[in-house]
């Protein structure tokens, strides 16, 4: 999560009054960073993944799994392992062959919001050389082995998005603490559930303070044959009187037919898979930010892994909206529940939401694509403008800067360090949108403009996490090499994000997507940013882009925006119309440009790109193995983690078809996932773990 500085944090009453100062200082810092870095070129294209784990403790005697509040101990053990620091990990050669040989950098472990969480990133960012791509899966497996080596025997790192019984009435955490502390004021979880670093309880308390009540998460319960109906969450206590916030439920916070949750931990305690790209220059970063944005909801649906909350099957498949609500600090005025009086504006989205801006200086970006509901701070935008920033980028940051800083340290308010980034990062890093545009950090001249892709759910196996990471990385190359145009209006992406929550959305729902992705240039000539084509590491040979370029077109001849996009299934988006499911089939040919009234499919585009690169057979096969997973998720022949978990629960002998996921079911579920992911000889199988377990009926 970054920003783990120490200091004296202000409570909400005090922090509130510092908001304007923090924002203005943040904008001043941003301008300094932007001026210093706007013209920098960086030859190296780098990327990195982030894997988040839950740490569970398996109690064999009681046949029970608990969340283990062990983050600090594990991180300490990792830091103190001198052998590890000196010589790298002492782990078995997991996969053998090419992949294992050329990677030796030690992974990095980080704290996260939950005291039961752990994050691991590669020791240094990956290049986009295929040599590196071949190492990713092994490295992810190795990270898990190293983490496990620094835990006690009964503890395991698991990559489930959420712990199925977080917030139930039983002792679901180890060590046990009773709920209802001063920071979270939750009925269901104690303050000890969060990382004790002062930043985290302050963040939680100030979100609650700003909002004026606890956060509110109501997730529709999955109605099974014997689910009591209407459903009233039986774990809600209407007679608690520890804190004023205990009135929330008496005032209707818990909704009928929903599982109700009331604390930041229910959202920020979820695990995601995030990918960060370093672009060659600011313009390429801006292009990637825009072009990857419409893919956010599609990848959310494909990675769906979250069908259980607080001991109940729910009727949604992903975590996103729960995190969104868990950090939603908007007041009743901002939410539009009461007329505006003290606040500045109505705010349509939570701080954690799908993104609301496009930022590329791209002649294809039509004004109709922009969000008509965008709220910006005009005064701050003017400052950025006066400082020389262009309209689109100034609008982007003036939108992020409508938010108040949540954690303010009094030490930081004495003097502005205009060459620092603390005030800028304060606002930037508490805007959790599905894309993040990251300026270079002032204290490290080696790091450039970066774009983070943030919507994906963590997958149970490293095979899957590697597959999705590599899929996105390859897509980024295809976007740049073919100069793809995936623009759709931002409100359609916002809608898609909602659609992605539906049960089995990946198979049953349709998403807005652009029909023709090929670069249709608009006169006058393309902006300079477009000319910066990616021709490096990944493109050994020709990029193939010329073969699909379409001619320049005067702006007046453009079709109405509504004709540019349509509702498509995930399979149509991924596999293309009638595309072959079978990876061993001959190469797809791209349709002639005139007839691309239908989207050709991301995987056919990727294969077209890969075949232009002269890859070795081994490399090509390995890449195909990852693409196969995505293709088969999209066409339904492989299940999402969400579908697999739901199926596991509903077929468990102790499941009573009443939506309740009890301790034994949870124990068996987690034991099964641990067995599936533990290092085994058969990891060298072509399909690897995570394959057979998601086949239909598995
Ligand atoms: P955050 O939590 O703010 O998203 P982290 O530091 O946890 O950031 O993770 C950032 C990811 O970006 C890591 O995977 C890391 O390898 C990767 N990364 C670090 N530096 C660069 C860089 N210069 N270019 C691209 N990726 C980078
Ligand atoms: Mg993280
Ligand atoms: Mg991180
Ligand atoms: Mg982080
Ligand atoms: Mg982060
Ligand atoms: Mg991140």
Image (tube, grey):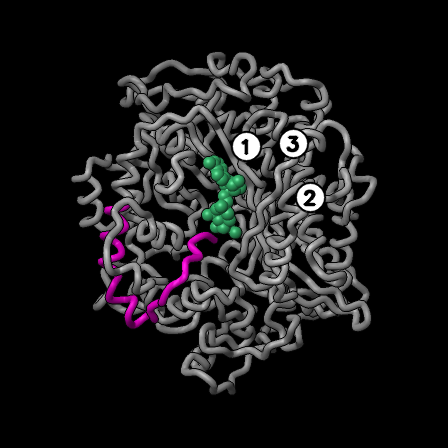
Residue 459 seen by the camera: yes
Which residue is nearer to you in this view: 62 or 564? 62
Residue 627: mark in rendering: 3
Q: What residue sits 55% from the left and 78% below the top?
A: 179
Quarter of the image for residue 694 reads top right
What kind of element bears circle 3?
Answer: helix
Which residue is nearer to you in this view: 128 or 298? 128
Q: Mark 2 or mark 3: which comes first in sequence?
A: 2
Q: What residue sits 33% from the left and 68% below the top?
A: 10
Quarter of the image for residue 172 reads bottom right
Q: Which residue is mark 1?
A: 473
Q: Is residue 541 left or right of residue 628?
A: left
Q: CA distance from mark 1 to mark 2?
A: 26 Å
Q: Mark 1 or mark 3: which comes first in sequence?
A: 1
Residue 89: mark in rendering: 2
Q: Which percent across, then down, holds residue 299?
A: 55, 42
Q: CA distance from mark 1 to mark 3?
A: 12 Å
Mark 2 vs mark 3: give the one in front.
Answer: 2
Which residue is nearer to you in this view: 404 or 220? 404
User: On screen, 291 above or below 262?
Assistant: above
What kind of element bears circle 1?
Answer: helix
> Is the residue indicated by label 3 positioned so its CB lies within 8 Å of ligand 1?
no
What kind of element bears circle 2?
Answer: loop
Mark 1 vs mark 3: give the one in front.
Answer: 1
Q: Which percent across, then down, holds residue 238?
A: 51, 84
Q: What residue sits 25% from the left and 47% below the top?
A: 418
Q: Which residues are magenta?
A: 1-29
Q: Mark 1 or mark 2: which comes first in sequence?
A: 2
Q: Is residue 249 left or right of residue 474?
A: left
User: On screen, 452 above or below 322?
Assistant: above
């Amino acid at each position: 999560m970054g920003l783990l500085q120490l200091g004296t944090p202000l409570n909400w009453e005090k922090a509130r009054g510092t908001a304007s100062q923090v924002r203005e200082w943040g904008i001043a810092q941003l301008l300094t960073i932007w001026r210093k870095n706007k013209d920098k070129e960086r030859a190296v294209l780098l990327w990195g993944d982030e894997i988040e784990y839950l740490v569970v403790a398996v109690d064999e005697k009681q046949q029970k799994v608990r969340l283990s509040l062990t983050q600090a101990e594990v991180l300490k053990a990792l830091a103190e392992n001198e052998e590890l620091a000196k010589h790298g990990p002492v782990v078995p050669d997991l996969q053998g062959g090419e992949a294992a040989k050329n990677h030796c950098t030690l992974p990095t472990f980080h704290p996260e919001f939950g005291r039961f969480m752990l994050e691991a990133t590669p020791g240094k960012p990956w290049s986009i050389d295929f040599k590196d791509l071949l190492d990713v899966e092994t490295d992810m497996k190795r990270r898990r082995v190293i983490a496990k080596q620094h835990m006690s025997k009964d503890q395991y790192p698991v990559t489930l998005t959420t712990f199925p019984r977080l917030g139930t009435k039983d002792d679901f955490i180890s060590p046990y603490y009773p709920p209802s502390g001063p920071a979270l004021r939750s009925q269901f979880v104690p303050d000890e559930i969060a990382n004790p670093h002062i930043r985290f309880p302050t963040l939680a308390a100030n979100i609650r303070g700003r909002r004026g009540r606890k956060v509110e998460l109501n997730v529709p319960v999955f109605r099974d044959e014997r689910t009591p109906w209407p459903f009233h969450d039986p774990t809600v206590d209407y007679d608690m009187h520890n804190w004023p916030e205990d009135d929330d439920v008496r005032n209707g916070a818990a909704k009928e037919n929903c599982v109700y949750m009331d604390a930041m931990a229910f959202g920020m305690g979820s695990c995601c898979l995030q990918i960060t790209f370093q672009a060659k220059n600011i313009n390429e970063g801006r292009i990637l930010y825009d072009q990857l944005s419409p893919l956010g909801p599609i990848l959310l649906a494909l990675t769906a892994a979250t069908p259980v909350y607080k001991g109940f099957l729910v009727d949604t498949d992903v975590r996103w909206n729960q995190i969104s609500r868990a950090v939603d600090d908007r007041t009743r005025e901002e939410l539009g529940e009461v007329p505006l009086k003290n606040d500045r504006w109505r705010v349509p989205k939570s701080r954690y939401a799908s993104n609301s801006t496009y930022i590329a200086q791209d002649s294809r970006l039509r004004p109709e694509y922009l969000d008509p509901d965008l709220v910006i701070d005009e005064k701050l935008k003017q400052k950025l403008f006066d400082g020389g920033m262009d309209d689109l980028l100034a609008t982007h940051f003036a939108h992020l800067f409508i938010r108040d800083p949540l954690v303010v340290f009094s030490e930081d308010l004495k003097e502005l360090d205009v060459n620092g980034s603390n005030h800028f990062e304060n606002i930037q890093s508490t805007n959790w949108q599905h894309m993040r545009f990251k300026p270079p950090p002032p204290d490290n001249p080696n790091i450039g403009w970066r774009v983070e892709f943030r919507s994906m759910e963590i997958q149970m196996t490293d095979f899957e996490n590697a597959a999705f990471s590599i899929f996105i990385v390859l897509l980024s190359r295809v976007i740049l090499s073919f100069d793809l145009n995936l623009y759709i209006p931002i409100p359609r992406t916002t809608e898609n994000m909602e659609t992605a929550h539906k049960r089995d959305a990946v198979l049953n729902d349709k998403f807005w997507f652009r029909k023709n992705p090929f670069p249709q240039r608009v006169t006058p000539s393309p902006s300079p940013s477009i000319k910066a084509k990616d021709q490096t590491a990944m493109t050994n040979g020709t990029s193939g882009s010329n073969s699909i370029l379409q001619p320049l077109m005067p702006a007046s001849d453009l079709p109405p925006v509504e004709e540019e996009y349509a509702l498509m299934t995930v399979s149509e988006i991924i596999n293309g119309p009638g595309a072959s499911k079978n990876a061993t089939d001959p190469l797809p040919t791209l349709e002639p440009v005139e007839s691309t009234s239908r989207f050709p499919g991301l995987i056919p585009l990727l294969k077209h790109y890969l075949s232009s690169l002269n890859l070795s057979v081994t490399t090509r096969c390995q890449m195909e193995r990852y693409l196969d997973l995505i293709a088969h998720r999209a066409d339904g022949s492989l299940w999402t983690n969400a579908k697999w978990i739901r199926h596991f629960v509903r077929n468990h002998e102790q499941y009573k078809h009443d939506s309740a996921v009890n301790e034994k079911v949870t124990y068996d579920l987690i034991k099964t996932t641990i067995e599936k992911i533990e290092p085994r000889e058969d990891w060298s199988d072509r399909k690897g773990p995570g394959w057979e377990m998601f086949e239909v009926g598995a």
